[in-house]
Amino acid sequence: MSENKTTKNWAIFIGTMIAVFILGLLASSIMERKAEAKFAYTPVVKIDKLEPRNEVWGKNFPKQYQSYLETKLDTTFNSKYNGNAMIDMLEVDPRLVVLWAGYGFSKEYNQGRGHLHAVEDIHNILRTGGPTKAGEGPMPSTCWTCKSPDVPRVMNEIGVAEFYKGKWADKGAEITNSIGCADCHNEETMELTITRPALVEAFERQGKDINDASHQEMRSLVCAQCHVEYYFDKKIKGKEGIPYLTFPWDKGMTVDAAEEYYDEKEFKDWTHKLSKAPMLKAQHPGYEIYKTGVHADRGVSCADCHMPYRTEGGQKFTDHHMQSPLNNVANSCQVCHREEGDKLIANVYDRQDKIIENRDNLEKLLVRAHVEAKQAWDWGAKDEQMKDLLQDIRHAQWRWDYAAASHGGSFHSPVETGRIISTGIEKAQEARIKLARLFATLGHNEEISYPDISTKAKAQKYIGLDMEKLRADKAEFKKTLLPQWMSESKAREDKY
């Protein structure tokens, strides 16, 4: 009996010692994690106002910076339709070449690889042309606006209008750091801040003060500096001739409101090479589409899904590996949704499939409308006979492009995106009905011959692009002017 009691006492003693040891380890771990959290943001360097170099910010915020670098290292993710791998969209869908005939996007259009590649990709893309010196090239300086934290620095140095002035190549040596910290953060308080004037100005024209936005709203508004519809207004009083970046929000933020705004101003991005329609090119109205969806209605911000919180070593911080939520379902979707990851992804694909099916139908109608309009001109149609139907083509393609360029709109707001596409189909059909009637008036009733545009090369040849020259010009730029930019940029940064 005594022996059993002794054994029991020893068991209790040993168990207690083990428990104390484990509790000690736990307490030590907790204290260590608290210490990590407490000293995580102790400044290592002083960050100057509008500091464009992300690696400098990274000295004070190493975890955020390391996650940010993943944007560059990880360029392989492909969902069913998008991802962060570079995809030649003209090769995937040659019809786009015809839709953008006469505009830069018909030369080259790739799915982006992520923010850290922004400057490199704009150097390489054929749309920026092949300037061999400043003052050359087809694109205005305004095209740099969303590509780099050097932009607010240069705007602060020379003024906003002066930054927009001139050609793309004029600012090439100044814009070298890819999208990063200074685009969205105040260097003293680290609070989210707006660094692009177009968004502030759009709010002001609507009678709003962007400074009244809450922190949660700012977690979307910093994205809305760039992921929006915009255009270059050359008719602003006092800034005539300067392609001043402007958001068409004065009448509202819907596709219909923007269309009305542009029509009143008689604005066009380009004249279509085939149909001669006065065209609008949607940029990437992701924010506007997001605002019409259920997530925005529930107060979910862009950052909640694309930059969810991450925990490492007791520290909770915003993940700066900006990417598709489908590549990070556990930290994005499943914070709110309790379904299995495969189920959530299947839900997304189901919405995308249905939207893209109708979007492709609209695309096919538009290609036919452009080709048929060209035939009408070839058969001697007059301006007055074409005016209304060309406006229908303009409005139909505006809706197609708005839905396509919203990047995620088929998930962010499938109901609104579906409505936009359905009204586009209606307008495209109306244009083709008017064309059929016009053909009869012109004395033609035969079937229209449509070109073979089954590949990107065939489509580009059909619209008259000299791709060999474009590639040669780009190669010359990379051989001559680009090294000069890099040398000037290094010399400037060495002075810091």
Image: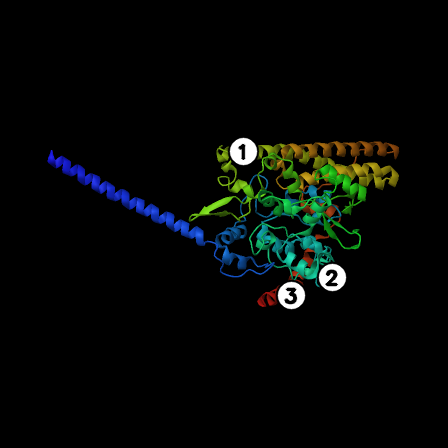
Q: Give how far across and how far down residue 494 sits, in percent.
A: 58, 67
Residue type indicated by callout 2? Gly
Tell me the CA gap for discs 2 and 1: 49 Å
Q: Quadrant of the N terminus?
A: top left
Tell me the CA gap for discs 1 and 3: 49 Å
Position of 314 compared to 88: left or right?
A: left
Q: Residues within 10 Å of mark 1 (few under 14, many from 20)?
A: few
Could you tell me if residue 380 is visible in this image?
Answer: no
Residue to which mark 2 is pinned: 135
Residue type indicated by callout 3? Gln
* First reached walking from the N terminus: tag 2 or tag 1: 2
Q: Secondary structure at mark 3?
A: helix
Q: Secondary structure at mark 2?
A: loop
Question: In the image, which disc is placed on residue 484?
Answer: 3
Question: In the image, which disc is placed on residue 346?
Answer: 1
Name which quarter of the figure residue 144 lies in.
Answer: bottom right
Q: Give how far across and how far down residue 209 sits, in percent.
A: 67, 46
Position of 317 compared to 112: left or right?
A: left
Question: In the image, which disc is placed on residue 57?
Answer: none
* First reached walking from the N terminus: tag 1 or tag 3: 1
Q: Nearer the viewer, residue 280 or 230?
A: 230
